[in-house]
Image: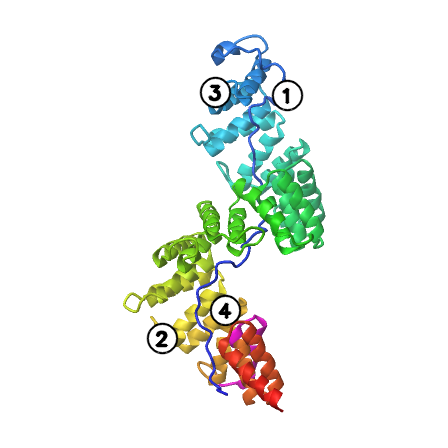
Amino acid sequence: MGKKRQAAPIEEAAAAVLFFSMEKPMTSSRLCILLMVLGFLSTSAAADQPTTPFAEMCSGGDAAQCLANLGNRYRHGLMRDYRKAKRIVYEKACSLSHGGGCSSLGQLYLHGTDVPQDDHKARELFEKACALDDGAGCGSLGDLYFHGTDVSQDYRKAAELYRKACNLEDGAACGSLGNMYAQGKVVRQDYVKARELLTKACELKDGSWCNNLGYRHARGIGVRRDDRKAREFFEKACALDDGFGCNNLGLRHAQGKGVRRDNDKAVKFFQKSCTLGNASGCNNLGLMHDAGRGVRQDYGKAREFFEKACSLESSSGCNNLGIQYAKGQGVPRDYARAREYYERACALGSGLGCYNVGVRLVKEPEDRRDYARAREFFEKACGIDYGGGCFAVGVLHANGQGVAQDYQKAWSYYEKACTLGHGGGCNNLGNMSSKGRGVAQDAAKAREFYERACELNDGVGCSNLGVLHYSARGVPKDLEKARKYFGRACDLGNQKACERYASLNTGRSQK
């Protein structure tokens, strides 16, 4: 039996590393109050209004009632210029000192929706709305102070405005204030108070904060970890058309957390999430089609959803689309296109995407191979704590590919990779310890690193651990342990270990 130590190779990362960042807590968002002048709305008076110009319709009499009727006509499609109607109705309502109209008009200016984007105008409108005791106006003004938009950033002022808005029953503001208590921004950190406020936000039908509560219960942040409660809050969020909530509910069903595993239901919730414009939901729906979970396997359908996810700036969607081009699944194989999508994923902050760009560069034909540029992408991946990137830079330094051979630098990168949970990095630390490269030769240290690699499901590390026990290097000779580790390495896809396991098995059966 050979005693050669294997180095863990650089391999292109697989597509379906399931459910990237699916339970990210969502920040507060403000939704416009569509067309209704809330204090005056009458839903029955729209049908008998003539389609005359606005100025004539609402120039006299009960202008507020007229506005309500006009809003109804646009809402029910009886008049056509819906976008213009929003601005006109909000302007008139605000001029009549209706806070909801001012707040909604401010949202149009804040986001540049059918009007020129104007933060200053938005702030003035939110200030007027808040002075009129409109909760959404106070909350939106609090957001400006929280983020420092058109004002100096002031967390204390933001907290004051959120508190006033929450008392006026604005759910988003209750959630934002609760989040400040959870983070200890300006106010003393208080998870109990945070939970009370977030619960109120959810009860006031703010889906994003129902999702946030679900996330907290799923991870045990400020509350006891509870998969069942997490699922319940995700259900509330999804019922309120929060795309993150639907995605996380799908994830619960796909993983069987807090509920029986059900791929059909997972697909249903991922579909709703994607329809609501949630990038993670689209990416996960693509993964379900890619793997044939809850749906018939269909690489073409998977590609469609990865494309949508990528267009919504999901780094995972872009990376998975790159994998499809690299493998020729649902599309003709095209390494250049694969690299384009990996680069886009990298630009969106994906360490995996950066790593895969580097892999494609070192897998080019020899005359086009670019180790120097590959190293740049691997280093970028490592810089954002993707262990595979650190491992790959270590390989380049160890082999002198694109850089001068430097075992000490290789050790440093392998060490970071191992710390980040990359089994290949731990295995290669074991190799260097075993051979005395860059460090003093130390068989005991080598065994520790191989054990760590094997714990991280690195097949090469398990195989090397088996070699140590077979050849009695740093450990007593133990054929049963060698057989155990070769078997595990074989299960992890290491063909050489399969052959060694078979050899030991045959020898044992002959005794």
**SS at mark 1?**
helix
The Cα atoms of the two marked residues, 4 and 1, are separated by 60 Å
Spot the residue most to the bottom: 511
> Disc 3 marks which amino acid?
Arg
Q: Nearer the viewer, residue 316 or 99?
A: 316
**SS at mark 2?**
loop
> Disc 1 marks which amino acid?
Gly
Q: Would you place residue 442 above or below residue 213 in this image?
A: below
Determine if the magenta segment contains residue 443.
Answer: yes
Magenta segment: 440-460
Give me the residue at 72% from left, 54% from top. Answer: 224
Q: Which residue is mark 3?
A: 80
Left or right of 228 on screen, residue 82: left
Mark 3 or 2, nearer chain start: 3
Q: Would you place residue 187 above or below residue 19 in this image?
A: above
Mark 3 or 4, nearer chain start: 3
Q: Which residue is mark 4?
A: 417
Mark 2 or 4, nearer chain start: 2
Mark 3 or 1, nearer chain start: 1
Q: Would you place residue 282 above or below residue 409 in this image?
A: above
Q: Which residue is mark 1?
A: 39
Spot the residue most to the left: 367
Tag 3–tag 2 contact (CB < 8 Å): no
Mark 2 or 1, nearer chain start: 1
Q: Few, some or many C-alpha atoms within 10 Å of disc 3 (few <14, some 14-19, many ≥20)?
A: few
